[in-house]
Amino acid sequence: MATPVNVALMGLGVVGSGVARALLEKGDVYARRLGRPLRLYRVLVRDPDKRRALPIDPAILTTDPARVLEDQQVHIVVELMGGERPAADYIRQALARGRYVVTANKEVMAKHGPELLALAHRQGVDILYEASVGAGIPIVSPLKRDLSANDIRAVRAIINGTTNYILTRMDSDGLDFTTALAQAQELGYAEPDPTNDVEGHDAVYKLAILASLAFHTRVPPEAIYREGITRLQGRDFRYARELGYRIKLLAIARRAAANGTEALEARVHPALLPQGELLAKVDGVLNAIEVEGDLLGRVVFQGQGAGAQPTASAVVADILDAAQALAHGRPPTPWQGDAELPLRPMTDLECRYYIRMEVADRPGVLAQIARCFGDHRVSIASVIQKETNEAAQTAEIVIMTHIAREADVRATMADVQRLDVVCEVGNFLRVEG
Amino acid sequence: MATPVNVALMGLGVVGSGVARALLEKGDVYARRLGRPLRLYRVLVRDPDKRRALPIDPAILTTDPARVLEDQQVHIVVELMGGERPAADYIRQALARGRYVVTANKEVMAKHGPELLALAHRQGVDILYEASVGAGIPIVSPLKRDLSANDIRAVRAIINGTTNYILTRMDSDGLDFTTALAQAQELGYAEPDPTNDVEGHDAVYKLAILASLAFHTRVPPEAIYREGITRLQGRDFRYARELGYRIKLLAIARRAAANGTEALEARVHPALLPQGELLAKVDGVLNAIEVEGDLLGRVVFQGQGAGAQPTASAVVADILDAAQALAHGRPPTPWQGDAELPLRPMTDLECRYYIRMEVADRPGVLAQIARCFGDHRVSIASVIQKETNEAAQTAEIVIMTHIAREADVRATMADVQRLDVVCEVGNFLRVEG
């Protein structure tokens, strides 16, 4: 059998251990598929003396990044440290030295992907990052290869398992946000500090990666509109169900016109989704990514979006791919960032809106509210007066609009909030589809 | 720009026209992605004088297969004729002459795939067949690449849109089979002669392809157990729903032990699926393929499984891939048919069973039936006495078994059918999961 391919891991946390375990336990299978052995050659760790459940030769552990980055024997550098720094710098160095790189790092790929892909291309190598979105669910590679005959029209995704778990519990068990979050934390689905998930940062990174790939452009994460799930209340789920919808945290990127030229919408926020849609049926910690192409129609990729083993599945597939590319000298797919689609401002978004407000329970209130909508040319599709609080003499009103421009809806809300008869605008949600 | 890649189509029917249209209309996009033009160089047709809606230069049309197969200028042969002969022979000739081949032909790939892949490998070229299963839904390429770090445990799929449409209508609208089929035919979802779909032949071909890929073995279509949907009645859907299930035509391939050695189950039949499962929610003409891997867990690929454009999406992706391989001399993934897993006989299957029977409506009947089950060690999980026909003095009984061996259940059924008190065993369905 041919000489081995030497793989160096940077990071031996949850994902790193999963990858190391797969390489150690399934080495024979991979060697047979590849035609040469894959050798776990070096592993960068914080503490080499930590007790580990893995049968790793202690001699390959190191705390010195140079022993990975500067060793000529390393063929593939696998970055599994997470976080922007120093991971991005290590990846840059590895590519600059002509190494193939595999990473699961969504933050690095969202912020520096286009630059790193261009660097890889100049160096005649590649950087592979299937695991950075949706763990083991194939989506990066299908966008690069299998859907390449299509002009992609839209990507809509549930790509954060933590929030999807919380929303599912709020919906099906009537929990409020705080209780559902606490249960997610108990089960290990949410971090002690859940900000990154519940405020949508994690989904924004993943959407930046998907949108850049799907639309052959650069979508920086800071340009993506972001809204978390903390404002949702149990009653929103009840009203949504009554109207035939589910509420999901969606990451959406879609071709759209802006001022007559082509542009891109890119946004992460909770949305009402008709209950018949595939994405509306994705429950619990599952992830699902829907891609709409001009030829293909809609295709959905669904599975576990996190976890050591599902992530290792994608990382090892990328390692096998890099090893084949190394062996056969296949040049990487060049970075095709030629399109440079501008992002459409959120205020130009056009969709239907769900608005829940608490109002004084007396005659003439609806007329005043309706006038605000009319003033901004926002057309009301339906009004439902919901639960009345007799003690406070207030009632809850849920309004669904026809398709309207977000700027107009926001202006309407500002006016509505100034009305004496309106106690509070409780929530304001976009409707998808 | 570099010299063009010459593509020859064999067949200009629905799919062929879709592919030709994509190549003609989106040529600029593909050329940019590829770095060289893709040229529609020749098209084999039955009748060159037929009026076509496509702007194809009549000079490239031919009725002579030799003008595709023997022309040195052809780089990629795209077989879209369908059917086993002469398609398989043309593909063989094209590969033997060192051409890359792209095909959407499930029958050819199911029956001759391993031989054609081996031939391609010997010739240093490749045969690509993403469109042969699930049209534009990526599944062949993910099994080859993205899931390659996994040992696949099971593939379960809804891969025939015609039957899924019929079953969905029978379930949601209470139609009987004949009416649902007639509506499917009216809408163009079913052929005038629907045998190939409703008897499960189409699904068997696709399962043969998927199972061979997933398990690195050869699964000939004639070895796959096959049962169509014609015996299902409206009441089966009602009873299934009451019990918490949906009925789907499933194509299943799964690792299983047989006599202590590793083997493979491969079967196509209607099955009861718990309503919470992803596949149970796949309705209408949609297809979905679920793959379970040791690292990955379950992942589902879902979308339109038929149609000119979705199929063209997969065919053109394969053409682009072949063109890249041509340009960069990437050798094809070798055929890995080393495992040769034996197929487990259907009589060794172990699962739960749903049995519906019409019996005399008098005391002691259930005792006689239950004794037959006991005689064969088939344990009954629940019995529900359903609608009674007072005129005929008969009642309907639905029995769910615990997990049992199929041979024992069949022997039980034979005994039950001999009982005087049993008018008819109406249906007998396997339960998945």
Image (tube, coloured by chain):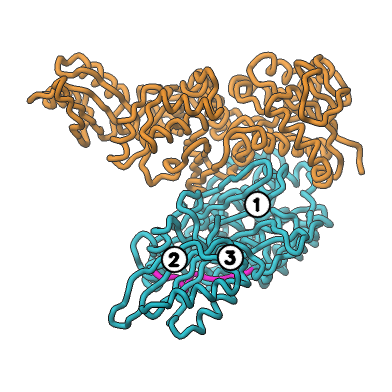
Chain colours: A cyan, B orange
Question: Of label 1 and label 2, which has the lower sequence position?
Answer: 1
Contact flag, marks 2 and 3 (Cβ < 8 Å): no
How packed is label 2: few (under 14 Cα within 10 Å), some, or many (20 or more)? some
Q: CA distance from mark 1 to mark 2?
A: 42 Å
Q: Which mark is residue A383?
A: 2
| Residue B124 % position (x, y) | 77, 29
Q: Which residues are magenta?
A: A225-234
Total tally of numbered discs in the picture: 3
What is the three-letter code of the residue carrying label 2? Val
What secondary structure is marked by label 3?
strand
**Is residue A259 rendered magenta in the image?**
no
Tag 1, which chain?
A: A
Q: Which image quadrant for residue A62?
A: bottom right
Classify the position of the N terminus of chain B by image quarter: top right
Q: Which mark is residue A140?
A: 1
Q: Is residue A215 left or right of residue B245?
A: right
Residue at 59% x, 23% y: name it. Answer: B110
How packed is label 1: few (under 14 Cα within 10 Å), some, or many (20 or more)? many
Residue B130, above or below A353: above
Q: Which image quadrant for residue A33?
A: top right
Magenta part mainly helix, strand or loop? Answer: loop
Q: Is residue B122 left or right of residue A272?
A: right
What is the three-letter code of the residue carrying label 1? Val
Q: Which mark is residue A181?
A: none
**Are labels 1 and 2 on one chain?**
yes
Question: Of label 2 and label 3, which has the lower sequence position?
Answer: 3
What is the three-letter code of the residue carrying label 3? Val
- Callout in the foreground (1, 2): 2
**Is residue A226 rendered magenta in the image?**
yes
- Callout in the foreground (3, 1): 3
The residue wearing badge 3 is A268
